[in-house]
Every structure is written in C-alpha cells, then in structure tokens.
Amino acid sequence: MATARPLVRTETDAAPVKTGVRWTRPRLRRKIRHGNRRGLPARVWTERSAYVFLLPGMLIFSVFTLAALIFAVYLTFHRWSIIEPDRPFVGLDNYRDMIHDERFTESVLNTIYFSGASVPLSMAIGLLLALLVNLPLRLRGLFRAAFYLPVVTPFVVSAILWKWLYNGDYGLFNHYLLQAHIIDAPLLWLSDKNLAMPAVILMSVWAGTGFSMVVYLAGLQAIPDELYESARMDGAGVWQRLRYITIPMLRPTTLFLLVMGIISSLQVFTQIFVMTSGGPVSRTTTMVYYMYLWAFKYFDMGYASTLAFALFLMLLVFTALQLRLVRQGFEA
Amino acid sequence: MSGVVEGVDLRQVAPEPAPPARRSPARKPQNGIQFRWQQKVVTYLVLTPLAILFVAPFAWLISASFQPMGEIFSTSPHWVPKDPTLDGYKGFLDVGHLTKAQQGQGHGDWRWFANSAFVAIAITVLQTFFNALCAYCFAKRRFPGRNVIFMLFLATMMVPGQVTLIPNYLIIKHIPFFGGNDWMGNGGHGWLDSYWGLIMPGIVSAFGIFLIRQYMLSIPDQLLEAARIDGASEFRIFWSVVLPLCAPALAANAIFTFQGAWEDFFWPLIILSSPEKITAPVGLALFVVQNRTSWTLLFAGSVIAALPMIIVFLVFQRKFVQGIALTGVKG
C-alpha cells in the first residue's frame, strides 16, 4: 500500500491523503507554501537541519560581533585597565575627556587628511589606467599585471619597502631627486613634519591604485558597445564619448569605489605603524593608531573604546551606503 | 523594516556571474576606439613609464634581497647586485651559518612563514566551508526566522573591524576553560597568544556569506528537490549538489580570504606575543619598528612573504578579476 503511494503529487491526485501516511518532504513543503499551515513548532522541527547548519556561524557572530559591540559600549562608561583589577564606572567621563582631548582632534584631522587625499588620487589614477589598459593593445595583459602587482603585495611588505625608499641617506627617492637636481639637499621624508603624511599617502596610492583599476575595468567592460557606435555615428569625438558616455556610465562604479575607499582609509593603521609610528610629533597619528596607543600602550581599554566608538559614528554613514550599494549591485 | 527585508529577498533575481566572453585582444575595437599606429605608439609611451614606476619598488626589493649590507648601504643604488648573496634567505632558513655579527643584528625565523601559512590555510578552508553552509540555508531553505537572522548577518557587515577590536581582545582573553581560565573566564590568558584566537573569529564572514548566497540563488530549486526525492539527507544535498555548482563563488571567497588572512596584521599583532608564534607580517613589522638594521634579512623576508600572494595571483589571475566583478560591481 505504502509502496504504491506516488512521491510527487500528480494531476490525478485527489485531496491529500491523511490516513496513515507520513508526510514526505515535498508534500510538506507544498503544504507550508500553500496554506493549511502547520504550527510553528512543527515547521521549526521539520527544518531543524537549517538551524544546525547555521549554528557555527551564529555562534561566532553573536560572540565576536554582537556581544563585542555591546561590550564596546559598556567599556566606554568604565575605566578599564588590563593591569588593574579595579574597573570603576565613570559615567560619561571618557566622552568628556575625548571632546577636550587635543590629540584626538588632531588624529581626526590627520585621518581626514589621509582619506581626502589618498582616495580621490587612487581613484583618478585607477580610472586613467583602466581607460588605457582597456584599449586594444597587444601587451595590455602585462600592463594590467604590472599595475596590480602592488595590490597583491602584502601591505606590511609594501610599507617596509617604502620606508627604505624614503630613507634620508640611502633611499632611492632622495638619490634620484638629487641626481635630477630637483632637490638640493636630501629630504627627511618620514621625519619631516610636513612631508610625513604626503609620503604615507603616496605609498598608499601606489598600493591601492591597482584595485581601483580592476574595478573600473569591470565597469568599463559592462558598457554596451552600441552606445559608442551610435555616438560615433552622431560624430562624437574621443573626448565627447568619454565625457558623455564613459564617465556617466561609470557612476555606480565610482560611487562603489568611493565608499569602499573611504571606509578602508578611515581605518588606516598598518602603514602608520610600520613607517612612522605616528610621528613626527603625532603628525601621522590617525584615529586607529591613536586608539591602538591608548589600548595597548597606555592600557586604558575604556578610553580606547570611546575612541573606537567615535570612529564607528564617522563610518556609520558610509557603511550604510556600502550595504545599499552591495545589495543594488546584485539586484541590478 | 519589512520593505528592507523584501529588498533583500528578491528571489526572482538570478545573478549571472558568468564572465564576459574573452575578447581577442587587438582585434575587436573596444569602446568604439579604433586605433591608428600613431595613437598606439603614444599610448605605449604613456603606459610604459607608468608601469615602470609601479613595478620599480618591487623590482628593487627583489634585487636588494640578494645584496649584502654594504651594497644596500652604498650611496648609489645597484639594480643588479654586484656581489649576490643568499645571506638574507639563509637568515630565515638556517641561522647557524650566519656570522656572529649578523646574528647580533637579529635573525628571522622560518616559523613566521609556517605560522602564517598554517593560519591562512586554516581560516580559508574553514571560512569557505562555514560561509557556504550559512549561505545555503539563506538561499535554499525556508525556515521560521530566516529573514530576521539574515538581516542580522547583513547588519554585521556594517560594523568595521577596528571598532570591535578592543572588546574582542578582552573576549579572547576571557574565553572559559582555555589558557588557564576557569569556567567564568578568569585567571588565565584565554585564547591570547594562541592560534585559536587568531582563527576562530575568522571562520565566518558576513560578506562571504552574502557573496555565496547570491550565487546560490541562481541554482534551480528542482535540482535540490530531485535530490530530496532520491532520499539524500540535507547535508548530502548541500555537499554533493549545491557545493559543486557554486565553485566559482567558493573560489572567489577562498582567494580573497587567503589574501586577507595572509597579510592580516593588526589582529595578530595584538593577539600574539611569543616570538615562535608570530606570523610573517608581524615578525617583519616588529623587526623594522625595533630599528634593527639587518636590511638584507628584512628584504629577503619580505620577498618570501610576498611570494605566496604573487603565486596565488598568477595562478588565479582571471578568478581575481571575476571575483571583483562578483563582489557587486556591475557597471
């Protein structure tokens, strides 16, 4: 009897047979979708494997993101030192200190300086390179690889390498600039108050341009050729096609790169740590580096968390935008 | 709120991540630009110096890693080592062969790279698996609470890593039963200075889950139903039907995860403290920050640290580009 039961409902099937037949999965699914719902506990039970599959991910997320966020907020209201067992509640003291902390203000300004210069620069150069290596050249694969090489180099390695290139006595920069008579005396790139940040920015642009280029390339290749064809029919020149077709069509890509670039550059740390350690006289101390100092040099986790919270607020707008962009990218 | 959920849950969307057909270079005029040879020459004249500028630092790194200290510290840089030496590389492979003076300047440790490789591979394998597992539930299963949980995951994408860095450090320190901790998580150092603390927070990523889920949506439900009718268990369906079908998304996820884990710096820097446990980026960076002077060694270590990434890039070059296209940029 049970063996004759068809597994999939066919046209000739009458109303679902209930007597003595256990529900098979396809039937159950259909029932869940089309009314005659079973109770919530039953649905949870039949889909229990999904919860089991999600368990590891849920666990990690709830500990290292959810709990961590709540804990971060909790920390901002306490003086919490790793070395001292006493961790008193201090109310809004940390926030008050932060507002009056001149080094904090400076770190915010330094971070904005870094982002404001490095993001547009690497995007502009990335776009230029993408336009060039998208041309029908025989060697363009080689050029693409060359421009992408800094991106695959580990960041710490790039930072070490550039620290040497900027070396006052033996660095390549000074050597070639002196040889070309652009400068008369060697420059102390990383220990000059006004040069340190531009030097770090230049290195970051070198390291990040390849990424912009590849993303722009993907954007360029998605522009339909017909647009260019018809523009040429209408007598549009190279510049006009660039101005009225390429740039507008790349707007979503530009927005994506801008938001991603701002988010990652506001969190700059590695270059600073390796190349300048925040110096000279905290001219390159960025927000994350300042947070690092308070957490792991002065051991004040409460104040460091408050600094992190300020960064979080700065990033909030951009991350919300990023989420929208990522979703739109998939829905388009 | 419901509008947002609906926005995410567009199941009619079938992302088409297939890469654009490979165009034969130098044949088909792209973007409507037809090339005369003069224009071609000008383009090469612009591109070549730029490419040299981008590659030169790296070329110099490789050259310098074979130069003895005296040559690195000469007033005019040598692009081709006059007196090539393997001292730098030896400093990582067998310390015994170095002179006393060289050892006094500090030496590297091959374990840095072994540690990095171990951690990066562990994170890559685990994360790809667990991401796919979660993605499968969100893409192909219907269960009560799915949308709420998915929204929760998506929202975590918004939290920048640096914000949860400090609380996570303390959480890692107070993991119960590990590193001499009692059940309340006190008394010891928890997962600090251990690979657990390095690997566990990285075994899932919201972004990776999202990436793979979008890809899985394009797998037809009928395939899964068929497997179900044949009596396959849910895990079997995931493992034998779904996973093979989303190989491109898995590859993209794995490549980016490996790259991120291999060059990760901040987290290992604060988690690890014993010299025999640190990873390559931390080891190299501390070497510089402590103002040790053995640059030959440092450059050799840098080359070794960069090699795996470059190999991965060369092998998966097209996957890299596809992966970037997969991450949501569609012109």
Image: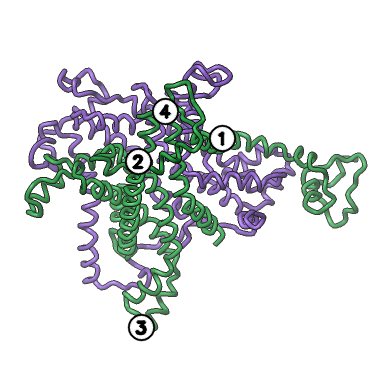
Give amino acid for label 3. Answer: Gly
- Residue B278 is left or right of residue B257, and the answer is left
Q: Residue furthest bottom?
A: A234
Specify the amino acid type for callout 4.
Answer: Ile
Q: Secondary structure at mark 1?
A: helix
Kind of residue at badge 2: Phe
Q: Which residue is mark 4?
A: B271
Q: Indicate the chain coloured purple by its letter.
A: B
Q: Position of residue A253 (x, y in %)?
A: 43, 61
Q: Nearer the viewer, residue B282 or A8?
A: B282
Nearest to the observer: residue A197 or residue B152: A197
Q: Position of residue A324 (x, y in %)?
A: 53, 56
User: What is the CA distance from the residue labelled 2 to the residue labelled 4?
Assistant: 16 Å
Cα distance between the residues tagged 1 and 4: 19 Å
Q: Residue A197: horizontal and vertical position, in percent? A: 26, 47
Disc 1 marks a residue whose amino acid type is Ala
